[in-house]
Amino acid sequence: MNIRRYSSVLITLFASTTISIWVGAIYLNPLVGDLTRIGGYTENDYHWNNPQEIFTTNLFTVAKSLEEYDKDYDVVILGDSFSCDQEIRKFGWQNYFRNQTGLSVLTLDTRKYWPFDVIHSENFKKHPPRFFIFESVERYAYDRLSYFAKEAIPPASAIGSTLEPLTIKPMGIQTEREKLNPRGCLDTDYVLGYLNARMERLFGWNKQVQKLPVTKTTLFSAKENEAMLIYFDEVSKQKLTEENWKTLREGMLHFQNIVESNGVTRLVYLIAPDKSAVYSPYLTSPADATVNLIEHAAKESRLRLIRSDLVLAEEIKKGTPDVYLPNDSHWGSIGHQRVAEAILSLLAKDHVIEPSH
């Protein structure tokens, strides 16, 4: 092959590859889901098609550092992606909670700060909140919370009888319905990333996301509605024993008493259920269902634990689609809304908040 022909072949291959990548960029919907991104699945197949209820402006922000905790807040949240990564979507549960209560909220990232970094900080001691919400995704909750079982347990405070309830004043902000805009993403890096993840999945190198067949096609509004995507490590809870569950409850109770020993703050646990646990009644293979950690934790009646598993399962049972997003491991707007309502209900039941008169 002479140099001219060789150059022509290279140019043709380069042009064909470039054109193919751009065609892919035009075809693919913009990437927004963590499961589609990691698993090598398309948004075209797994993006939601029903509108989501959003706030045009977020009512909460996530502190970039603990130094921003420099004044009094009614509520301090230490959470992971279910609390800290929802700003971009504008339907995080903090939006609904603040809209319903008007309480001031500070959100910190538990992937950046260990709980003791927060509650033992001078900021926390100087500005103790009335409510400290510890949020964790279910698949990491055992490791995060069983740790505290080894801590010395302080005596429970008499907080319930010494503090006046907080007055809530709903903000009354209206949400808007946001629909999917099925335009091409024009992001060539996304196309290359998708092709790489898909290739790894086809060859069995990428097992981070599992695809589980379901018995109902109305669970999600995505084009692909006969199966759902989950993270592979949701099944890690299956190895936990009765002794582990006892340690978990002990750790949660210890940490609750540690937080509340200041006589001012109430701790509330919010565990975000794994997708496969909540949708377990609708999985084609019962063996794909994972154990419900929240149910085991709730056997300790002294814990202030949001039964997010029951709230979300009830909404799914009603036939509501996209309680969890089909392309993602997180809730849709209705899931965030129902969880916020569950927190409000628990606080009202404990008589630690009351409506304005």
Image (cartoon, helix red, strand yellow):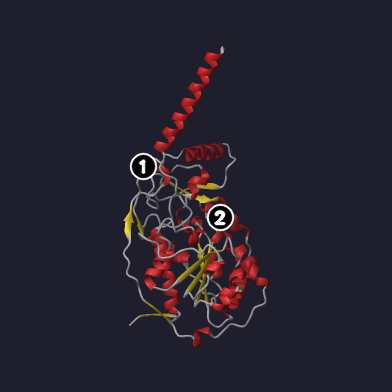
Q: Position of residue 46 (x, y in %)?
A: 42, 46
Q: Is residue 265 above or below residue 30?
A: below
In contact (CB < 8 Å): disc 2 and disc 1: no
The residue positioned 53% from the left and 40% from the top of the image is 197
Is label 1 in a helix, a strand or a loop? loop
Q: Is residue 280 above or below residue 249?
A: above
Task: Determine crowd level at label 1: few under 14, some 14-19, many 20+ residues with C-alpha closer than 10 A.
Answer: few
Q: Residue furthest top?
A: 2
Q: Position of residue 225 (x, y in %)?
A: 40, 47
Residue identified by numbered label 1: 183
| Left or right placement of residue 60 versus residue 263 in this view | left
Res 234 label: 2
The residue positioned 49% from the left and 50% from the top of the image is 34
Mark 1 belongs to which amino acid?
Answer: Arg
Closer to us: 226 or 197: 197
Q: Quadrant of residue 121?
A: bottom right
N-term-proximal mark, 2 vs 1: 1
Q: Position of residue 15 (x, y in %)?
A: 47, 25
Q: CA distance from mark 2 to mark 1?
A: 33 Å
Q: Is residue 279 above or below residue 68?
A: above
